Image (cartoon, rainbow, N blue to C red):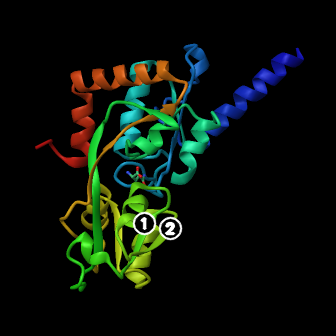
Amino acid sequence: MKFKKILAAVAAMSFAVAALAGCGGGSGSSSSSSGAKTLKVASSIDFAPFEFQEESQKDYQGFDMDLIRAVGKEMGREVEIQNISFDGLIPALQAKNVDVIISGMTINDERKQSVLFSDPYYQSGLTMVVRDNEESIKKFQDLKGKKVAVQIGTTSAAEVKKIEGVEVKELNTPADCFMELKAGGVDAVVNDRPVNDYYIQKSGATGVKALEEKLTAEDYGIAMGKDNAELQKQVNEALKKLHENGEYDKIFAKWFGEKK
Ligand code: GLN
C-alpha cells in the first residue's frame, strides 16, 4: 500500500517536471502507458534557432527541439526536455540526471573524453558580430588588442583564447554577449554562425553586422554518457531513419530553408 503511494507520488512528480520543462509531443500521455522509458534531454535554451522559447509559447522551439522529438518518436520514447545552462550540460549528463544533450554542441576531442557523441547532425562553425560602424575589425586576426564576448564553456571561448592579445569576456548566454556588444562593453562577439545569422536577420537586430569569415568548421552531435554505447547506437539508428524518410530534411527546411 505504502509502496503504491510512493509510486503514485513519483509518477505525479515526474509528470509535473515534464509539464514544467515544456516537454514535446503535447499529447499529455504519460510514458508509462506504453511501458517505454522517458528520454530525458538537456539543452541550454538560449540558442535560436536551435533551442529557444518564445514568451507566448509553452514548448521549447527550434531545430534541435524538433529533431530530438523526432528521434524520441523513432525510438518509441516520450521526450522530456530540461533547460540547463550550457556549461552545466555535460556535468548533468555525467551525474546521470539526463540521458542525452542536444544543444548545438560541437563534437570535439576534449568533450569526447567525457561523453559519447552521435553521428554529426548539423554543420556549423564560428563567425563574429561587430557594431555596424566598426572599421578596425574585418577578420579574426584583427581581434588582437580588442575585447571579445563569448558564451562560457563553448568552442568560441576556447578558440578566441587561442588568438594572441585578445581580452576575452565570458558571459552566460549569446544574448548577454550581444547586449554587451551593443552597450559598448566589448568590440566583437564570437559565436556559432547560424545563431549569429539568425540574430541579425530574424530578430531584427540593429546597429550590428555579422562578418563572413569563418574561424572554424564544426559539427554538432547529440551527446550521451560515456558508458551508454547502446543509447548511442539507438540515437544513430533514429537519425539515419530520419534522413531516409525525409523527416530530417523537413525539419531542416522549416528552420533554414531548403538545403542548397
Ligand atoms: N557549438 C558551440 C559549442 O559546442 C556552442 C554551443 C552553444 O552555445 N549552445 O561549444
Q: Where the C terminus falls, by quadrant?
A: top left
Residue under label 2: 171
Residue 85 visible, this orientation: no
Is 85 displayed left or right of 66 in the figure?
Answer: right
Residue for point 29% across, 25% down = 242
Q: Residue furthest left?
A: 260
The answer to whether the residue labelled 2 contacts the one labelled 1, judged by CB atoms less than 8 Å apart, is: yes
- Residue 42 placed where, x, y %? 53, 41
- Residue 151 placed where, x, y %? 45, 62
Q: Where the N terminus falls, by quadrant?
A: top right
First in sequence: mark 2 vs mark 1: 1
Residue 111 visible, this orientation: yes
- Residue 238 placed where, x, y %? 36, 22
Residue for point 42% across, 83% down = 183
Quarter-wise, where is residue 191 in the image? bottom left
Q: Is residue 32 above or below residue 127?
A: above
Is 33 displayed left or right of 203 in the figure?
Answer: right
Is 112 displayed left or right of 145 in the figure?
Answer: right
Amino acid type, residue under disc 1 in the picture: Val
Q: Is residue 156 above or below residue 209?
A: above
Which of the pair 196/117 is nearer the observer? 117
Q: Residues within 10 Å of mark 1 (few under 14, many from 20)?
A: many
Which of the pair 137/12 is nearer the observer? 137
Where disc 2 sits, the SS reads strand
User: Which label belongs to residue 150?
Assistant: 1
Residue for point 47% across, 44% down = 59
Q: Residue furthest front?
A: 164
Residue for point 25% across, 72% down = 141
Quarter-wise, where is residue 97 in the image? top right
Is 24 displayed left or right of 121 in the figure?
Answer: right
Where disc 1 sits, the SS reads strand
Amino acid type, residue under disc 2 in the picture: Leu
